[in-house]
Amino acid sequence: MAQKPKSEQDHLSETREKLIVAALPHVVFDGWSDAVLNQAITDSAVDADLAKLAFPRGALDLALGFHFRGDAAMTRAFAALDLDKMRYSEKVAKAISLRLELAAQDKDAVRRGMTFFALPIHAAEGARAVWHTSDAIWNALGDTSTDVNWYTKRMTLSAVYSSCVLFWLGDESAGHDDTEAFIARRIENVMQFEKAKAGFRKSSLGKAFANGPGRFFANIKAPHTPDDLPGSLK
């Protein structure tokens, strides 16, 4: 049976992978920069015009490509796990742990990415990258929300994930055991908040809010397609 011809998107995905792999040894020393991208083009023998199509904004798209690559790896690895006996909160913690575990071999590149996205000019893209990770985790967990909860879940997890990454970057414990404990504590904090929020909704004040100002939130809907999500290389 003849193989299906590769699409333009297939070629771009392969090009991005080649450039990211070629760039990583240089990122450790020189950070995410256009100079590193140019070196990756040379090392990988990728055509310069094709590289421009793959990463039109240069170093910014290269750094984002690396981040999204990690999200995709987490999604694949998470789908292969048997988590039936885990509580939902444990599954969330596992997804965060897995995302960091898979990034461990490129920890210095992640650290360089934190510095890169801390720059004011890149801060918005950095926030979108974290949102992308949060969305990937919720999708891996099978989240089906389509209302305002779609946004609140991702905003909450984005904050949790960001704090976990910062802790992980400074964690020198064996097997990152301290990070595992930190993740568990952060998830427990979120679960306590969710319990308090559920209690508020059941209270007389909560019901009054839902029937008044809260009606506004009932009209908020989640994006319809993946292309509506922030932070995706098309």
Image: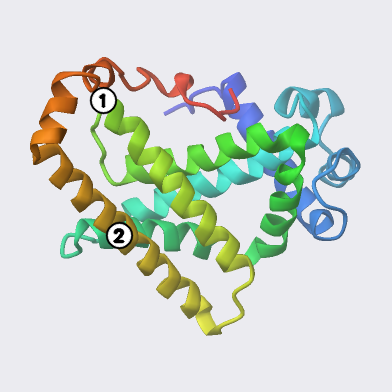
Q: Which quadrant would the N terminus be assigned to in this image?
A: top left
Question: In the shown orientation, is residue 143 left or right of residue 13?
Answer: left
Residue 18, x across and y down, in percent = 71, 43
User: Residue drawn at (86%, 28%), measured in percent from left and top?
Assistant: 48
Give the residue type that dot 1 points to. Answer: Thr
Q: Secondary structure at mark 2?
A: loop
- Relative side of 82 to 173, left or right: left
Q: Label 1: how many residues lie within 10 Å, few (<14), some (14-19) or many (20+)?
A: few
Q: How is the image coloured?
A: rainbow
- In the rendered image, the vertical position of residue 190 relative to residue 63, given as above or below: below
Q: Earlier in the sequence, mark 1 or mark 2?
A: 2
**SS for dot 1:** loop
Residue at which label 1 appears? 146
Q: Position of residue 39 (x, y in %)?
A: 89, 45
Task: Name the side, left or right, on which 229 lies relative to 120.
Answer: left
Any part of residue 137 in sight:
yes
Judge whether residue 104 can be spotted in this image.
no
Residue at left offset 50%, top offset 61%: 164
| x and y percentages locating residue 79 in the rendered image | 32, 51
Where 22 sits versus 103, above or below?
Answer: above
Between 147 and 211, the one nearer to me in the picture: 211
Residue 214 placement, left or right of 46: left
In the rendered image of this protein, does residue 216 appear above or below residue 162?
above
The alpha-carbon separation of the residues under discs 1 and 2 comes to: 26 Å
Instruction: Say what amino acid the circle numbered 2 marks.
Output: Leu
Q: Residue furthest front?
A: 205
Count residues near mark 2 (Cα–Cα under 10 Å), then give few for <14, some for 14-19, many for 20+.
Answer: few
Q: From the top left corner, tell me how far across and down residue 197 is, in percent.
A: 22, 45
